[in-house]
Each structure stands twice: as C-alpha cells, then as structure tokens.
Amino acid sequence: MPSLSTSDHASVVSLNLFVALLCACIVLGHLLEENRWMNESITALMIGLATGVVILLISNGKSSRLLVFSEDLFFIYLLPPIIFNAGFQVKKKQFFRNFVTIMLFGAIGTVISCTVITLGVTQFFKKLDIGTFDLGDYLAIGAIFAATDSVCTLQVLNQDETPLLYSLVFGEGVVNDATSVVVFNAIQSFDLTHLNHEAAFQLLGNFMYLFLLSTLLGVATGLISAYVIKKLYFGRHSTDREVALMMLMAYLSYMLAELFDLSGILTVFFCGIVMSHYTWHNVTESSRITTKHTFATLSFLAETFIFLYVGMDALDIDKWRSVSDSPGTSVAVSSILIGLLMLGRAAFVFPLSFLSNLAKKNESEKINFKMQVVIWWSGLMRGAVSMALAYNKFTSAGHTDLRGNAIMITSTITVCLFSTVKATTSFLSDGNTPKSIQIPLLDQDSFIEFTGNHNVPRPDSIRGFLTRPTRTVHYYWRKFDDSFMRPVFGGRGFVPFVPGSPTERDPPDLSRA
Amino acid sequence: MPSLSTSDHASVVSLNLFVALLCACIVLGHLLEENRWMNESITALMIGLATGVVILLISNGKSSRLLVFSEDLFFIYLLPPIIFNAGFQVKKKQFFRNFVTIMLFGAIGTVISCTVITLGVTQFFKKLDIGTFDLGDYLAIGAIFAATDSVCTLQVLNQDETPLLYSLVFGEGVVNDATSVVVFNAIQSFDLTHLNHEAAFQLLGNFMYLFLLSTLLGVATGLISAYVIKKLYFGRHSTDREVALMMLMAYLSYMLAELFDLSGILTVFFCGIVMSHYTWHNVTESSRITTKHTFATLSFLAETFIFLYVGMDALDIDKWRSVSDSPGTSVAVSSILIGLLMLGRAAFVFPLSFLSNLAKKNESEKINFKMQVVIWWSGLMRGAVSMALAYNKFTSAGHTDLRGNAIMITSTITVCLFSTVKATTSFLSDGNTPKSIQIPLLDQDSFIEFTGNHNVPRPDSIRGFLTRPTRTVHYYWRKFDDSFMRPVFGGRGFVPFVPGSPTERDPPDLSRA
C-alpha cells in the first residue's frame, strides 16, 4: 500500500510511541502493583512526564508533546467508554438506594462549591497581577474546579470494598456533569449581574429538564437495544453482531445526547445501567463474557491513555514560558485554587451529609463523620476532565497568548498533578494492594455493617415497610419490572439461559456457552 | 460538560448518522439474511447509496457525503483490525500447506496482472481524450487494479466451507500488499524508461527484503506478546490487561511496519497467526472468549463501515460533475478497466495454477480448472482498498481538478460498485445462506476431497515422507515447536488450562473460566 507516502509521518511516529507507551504502562503498572505508592494511573502519569522530559531534551526545549490536546478526542472518544463501563458495572441496588443523597451532592453540592470557588477567586485574584478577568471568567473557574472528576474517582475507590462511598462519590461526579452543562449555559445566556429569584427558578427548571431528558434518552436507547436483540435474537447466528450492536447503541446514546445539547455523561451512564439490567441478559453467554470484558478493557485503555496524556502534556513548554518570569504568581494561584477547592468541597459535603442523615432513620444507612471526610477528600482530585474544561475556556486553538490564560492553564495542570498524586497515594499508602483501599480514615466495622446488609430479604411485612422505606420502593420496582418490563425487554430469568450478572464476582456458569 | 460549545456540530451530526446507519446495516443485514441476492456488504453498500441520495436531495445537489474520504482513517484505523482478525482466525495448516502457491499468486501473479493492465491502458487511453498521463500514471493504474482486495475476498469466500480457495485468494491478497509497496516504490525511484536485468533483480531483491522483514516483524511482535503474557501471567489479576495488551501489541505491529515503510498488512497478518498459535493459549478462558469475539466484532464493524462509506461516497457530486459532459468516455474507461482486470487476472491465474499443479504429486492437492475459475472470478472484486489507492494517486486533498483525474476516480468507483455487486451476488445467488457459498462453478465432490483430508495423521514412515512432503515439513515444524518454541512462548498444552483454538467450531470447554 502506498499509504506511507501520503500519511503524515509525524502522526505515525506519535501513534507508535503512544501505543508502545500504553503497553509499557500496562506492564509496568502490573510489575509495580505491589508497590504501595504506585497504581496504574500514577504509573501512566509518571511515564507521561518522563516521555515529556525526553521529548523536551530531544527537541532542544521546543516541544514536549506528541499530539495537541484535543477536546474532541477526549469528549468524543475517551470519556464515553469510561462512563458507560461505570454504568454497566455499577452495583445498581447500592446506587439507587442512595439516589437522593447522590442528587443532593451532585446538584446542590456542585452549586455551593462553584459559588465558594467563584467568590474566593474574585477576592484573591484581584490582589494578584494576572491580567483581567470578568465575572464570566470567574464563574467558569468556579464551574471547572467544582466538577468532580469521575475518572479519577474510579482510580481510588473500589466499589466491591466500599460500595456506599463509591456510589456516592462516583454518582456525584455523574450528576454534576448535568449541573456543569447548566452552569456553563447560564454563564453564556443569563445577565449574571442581576440574578433574581426568577432566574434562579429558571436555572432549577433547566437542570430538571436536562437531567430528566438525558436520563430518559439513556434509558430509551438501552431499552431499544434490549428489545431489538430480544426480538431478532441474533445469538442464533452471531455473537459478533450482538456485541457490535451493544457497542454501537451505547455510543449512539452518548452522541445523541451531545447532538441535542444534553449531558452525554448522564445519558451513557444510564444507558449502561439499563443495558446491564436487560440487554446483557438477552445475548448469548459468549456475548456476555465478551461485552463485560470488552467494555472494561476499553474503559481501562481510555483511562490509561488520559493519564499518560495528562503527564505528557503537563510539561508543554509554551504554557510555562509565559509564566516563567513570575513563578511566584503561578504558585500563588495554584495554592489559592487548591485551598478554595478544599473549602468549597467542605462547604457542601458536611452540611449535606448532615441533612441526608436527618432523613434516614436506620443508623446503619447514615453517613458518619469518617465517611464524610473520605467523600470530601476523594472528590478533591482534578484530572483530565478539569484539564479539558480549562483548555476549552482559556485557550483558542491550543495557544495561550494572554498571560492570564497561560497562568490559569499552568495552575490547572499543577492542581491536577498535585491533587491526583496526593489523593491517590494517600489512599494507596495504607492499603497493600492497588484499589483495595482499606480506607485509612474509616474503621472496618462501619463498613462491614454497610456492605454486609445488602442481602437482606425483601420486606414482606408492615415492619419491613416501616423500617426500610427504600427497600419497599425497590420491592414495588421489582414487581413492576417482573410484570411489565422484563416480559417486553428481557432480562434475568426471561431468556433461555440462567445468567450471572456483570457485577457478580463468582464465575458465571459457562457450560452452555 | 461544555464540550458542546466547542466541538464541531457538523462532525457530531455525521458521527451520529454513521453510528445509526451502522446499527441499521446490522439489523437489516440480519433481516435480509434469507434473501439470496443480499449479504451484509451489499446491504451496507445499498444503505450508503440511499443515504447519499437523501443527502444529495437535502443539500440541493451540493454534496452527498458526510466525511471526506480519508486514507488515514482507512489505512490506520479500519484496515488493521480486518487483516489482523483474518490472521487470527485463519486455518493455519491450510494456509501454510499452500504457501508456495500463495506466494506465486501474490508476487509473480500481481506483477503479471500489473503489466497486462499497464500495457492495456497505455494502448487504449491514448485513443480516448482524457487528458495527459505519463508512464508513472499508467503504472500506478496497473498497480491499483492489480491489487486484490482482501476485504472483499472475506465477503464472498467462507473459510469453513472452501478452505483451499479461501487460503489461496485471501493469501494472495495479503502477499500482494508487499508487491504493491515494492511496485509503488519502484515507480518513484527507478528510471522506468530504461528497465534492464539489473533493475529487475533489484526489484526482486526489494520484494524479498520487504516480505521477509514484514513477516519477521509480525512474528516478533506476536512472540513478544506471548512471552510477556506468559511470564507476567496477568490472568491472575485481570482479564482486561491481557485483552488490552493483545490489542495494543497487534496494532503496534501494524504501526511499526508503517513506520519502517514495510507492508503493514503482511506484518499484522503474521502477528495474528502467531498470536492465535501462542499468545491466545497463555491467557485465561475469559480472555480467550473475549479476544476471539472482540477481534471478530471490530473486523466486522470496520468492514461494514467501509462498505457503507464506499456506497455513500460513490455519489459525491464533485467527481461526477467534471465528467458529466462526456459520459461516454467515463463508461468507456470503466469498461476498458473491467476488461483489462479480467484479462490481467486470467493471464496469471491459469498459467500459475498449471505450474503449481506440476509440482504437486498428489492429485487431490491440485487446483482443477473449476477452482481456477473461482480463483480468477473471486479475485476480481475491487473495493475500498482500490478506492483508497485511487484517491491517493488521483486527488490532492480530496479535490479532482484535472479532468483526467476525475475520470479515473469515477471509473474506479464504477469498477468497485460493479465488481463487488456482480461478484458477490453471483456467489450468493446459488447459496441459500449468506457466505455459505456452495461455489456455483465447482462441484461438491472435488471439495470434499480437498477439505476432508486435513485430518490425515502425521506421516511416520518413509512412504509418508515421499507422498506428502508438505506434511513432513509440518512434522518437523511441530517437533521444533514442541521442543523449543512452546516451552518459551507457551501455547496449546503448555499452559494450565486445556484450551480450544480460535478456529475450532466446537464450543470450547468453559467450565474453568
């Protein structure tokens, strides 16, 4: 093939390097697994940094990166598989039991955090000489740093070992994507200097609209995939078609959400939940194994790629050059941002946890203080999502012309590197195996209490109804599901084979594959 | 995420449409499966054409396509999974038993075919008024139309039912990729007006160098993946890492070949063979099922995407506008090309088959006349590979300014559409199920003779050595493999679990997954 003569040689070189580095990340991440200070993300970040240094030396300080950071690459190709897989593998019971708390954290919490950070930077930045920012810029900074990075959360919390915390922090990250879209749209369309009750209600209405529509789109796409596969029953002929259709429909849900200006992250997350509940049970056993592992692999690769890329991009010389004459300012900005981040998170985690606990009668379902500290701390990390947002706001076509913008970019990078390494290692340092976070701030007893009781049988008595109201919602959902949904869309028990669930740890019965 | 505001709205729309159309292709392809005139490729081609018409009407005749045909997209992302999967699932014994014949067809055959087509167009095109072409252009036309499209071959030949024909035609397509690279390089670097013996030997040397190096690179990458996975034995921890590493290493082999100006298709094909022989047996049962189906699914999606795209691109109005004032010329050029294609292929299939038969003592291993006709006919199809080559040669940045170039592009499209639909339907019309080609030109007896004897036991006697020399090569290879290769690189029987092979039809024993 004469493609060699036309395809860009430089892009072939960088693709080679990226693929080779990804291999290195997997192998090294495996070898360093026993090390208490490292996990796969940190390894990828370090390899990225090291590669950046090498490229910087080779190019005589001209460049440290192979690809220009592309938001499209990130939002269109890397993020969807990660979030979809999270929805596909999430423990659904745990997630829906804490749904109200997750919504509180994700919606109200993000607004509080955003407000605190915006007010903070408005006060502090005026005292520093870093160019002119208007209110819109300050609000953007608030929105960028208030958004929890769901990808980072996956790195430090393990849903098998800390299901409640995982569902709270990760769920918060998913829900606050919708909040971010609303806040960003508000910045563009509202007259923010005259914020009144009416505008506030309109914002609330926008959020509800966006949240419901995004969720509905995800659920609808998932149900369509379940129905189509159940009706046509591809399994008779080809596992490949079933797998292809599941992948395509999942991706389609995200892209449709993007098309209609909805929250793609919410949509694809709920699409993942619906697919694991219905579609996954309608396919052959081979398809089940394949989809489960393929989605996990794609998500793992995308995560590794992101961390590798963030590490490599952190050294980009252009951005540092414009701030090199005032290193003090950059350090100050980074410190202020980290401080405000911690303050803004504290300002909603503790009050909202208190509120959430008031509503819960059962002592074991309350969020104790130690857990609140974990939620506060594990949500601090800012990673690729924050980077992408900062690039979006403060650069045009990858260039950082204005000094203020350059400082914001480098500060974001500093905050990302610092918070990721700090938060991750603080979790890892007390565990012996990666992700097996025996949460240092949390005693084991309160956990066992939490994780142990999710096998409690359905309440069949009035006593059960009174003591466990959420269980009862679940009971009625199961009745509805069994009577109306599963006969139409399939699911466990409504298809020929007796299946395992994608979240079950036991090996599925493969004898009929 | 505020990505919506920045990411190109048009690209989101076209991605949505593409994903939705791919879903439609899968569902419709399934529903039309019983139809004798359709298969999944033709369905995709038709859906692409229909979409092209709709876009043409909506845009008032301005445009019919959503994406500009990108060679990078094709050669860097779509082709590697297809060829790798072919290598991964190929019946290795059948392939290597016919290795000499495949090399004859792929190397010598392509040169003969290229020569015939070049001489033909040189004669005919001078009589038509289609702009000025030099010798390089004529040679390029020869090389483009001499290259068998491996992707199309996969569509009409089924390796389970016609293993010999499949291995011959598909193998030819793989080997002739190396030939194409050599021919194209030769066009650029040699003084073609003074071709002498020395230059011919140099060309032969180039081919051997390219063929051996490409093969070695593929084999080496495959062996490294087998060794790494066997040594680290990722399976203890994560199926996802094994799957990710296999995917990355396979892709790396292709990209390395592109980097070093080798034949990526040859490299990734041999990498697939080595991975299915060693690496695949070193991973967990879940990984085996996942890789087998994931590679097949990705290949299937890439194929469907290509046919959909070719269909959509065929109507692109720009290309047809410049030829619309002389439709007669375009038809003449297309007809001449199809005629020369058939002549060029006939010029090597029949003589080389005769030569190949001379070397075979066993009557059942000879290629009879009916089979030769099938090889001649099934290799006639030109599809996306030819399109990509034609675009590469006759357009700059997607534009067809010169009239001669526009005619060449439209003629290539005509040849592709005509040959694909013609060849595919001629195969399908005599079979009842898709791909279950009970080759119309071939009686069943000669097949059974062929396919039935690949379970003949290894020769342990002198008689076996004399009557079945290729079997004996296989015997010594097995001894070498068992004594030296498998202890180092793993493989069937050298890893804890008893595995199936990716080409086996029986369901593997999954009880230990």
Image (tube, coloured by chain):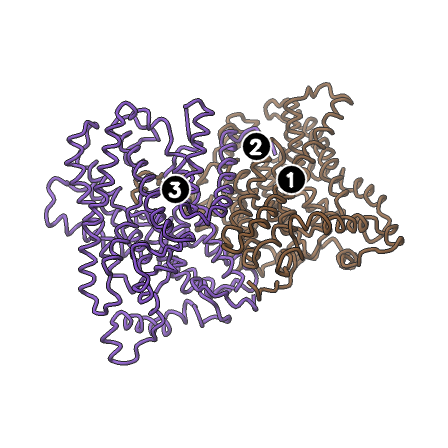
Chain colours: A purple, B brown
For label 1, the residue is B266
Q: Residue at x 76, y 26 (%)?
A: B201
Residues at marks 3 and 1 touching, judged by CB atoms closer than 8 Å: no
Rendered view: A161 above or below B122: below
Numbered disc 1: what chain?
Answer: B
For label 2, the residue is B259
- Residue B477, percent from left and from top: 76, 48
Q: Residue at x 51, y 70 (%)?
A: A497
What's under tag 3, amino acid-wise?
Answer: Phe
- Residue B126, percent from left and from top: 66, 24
Q: Horizontal placement of B410 versus A103: left or right?
A: right
What's under tag 1, amino acid-wise?
Answer: Leu
Numbered label tally: 3
For label 3, the residue is A74
**Image quadrant for the N terminus of chain B?**
top left
- Residue A26, percent from left and from top: 49, 45
Marks 3 and 1 sit apart, C-alpha to C-alpha, by: 32 Å
**Mark 2 or mark 1: which comes first in sequence?**
2
Neighbour class for label 2 at 10 Å: few (<14), some, many (≥20)? Answer: some
Residue A257 appears in view: no
Q: Quadrant of residue A463?
A: bottom left
Residue B154 appears in view: yes
Marks 3 and 2 sit apart, C-alpha to C-alpha, by: 25 Å
Q: Residue at x 45, y 72 (%)?
A: A493
What's under tag 2, amino acid-wise?
Answer: Leu
- Residue B487, percent from left and from top: 68, 50
Numbered disc 3: what chain?
Answer: A
Numbered disc 2: what chain?
Answer: B
- Give the secondary structure at mark 2: helix
State which mark lies toward you, 2 or 1: 2
Marks 2 and 1 sit apart, C-alpha to C-alpha, by: 14 Å
Residues at marks 2 and 1 touching, judged by CB atoms closer than 8 Å: no
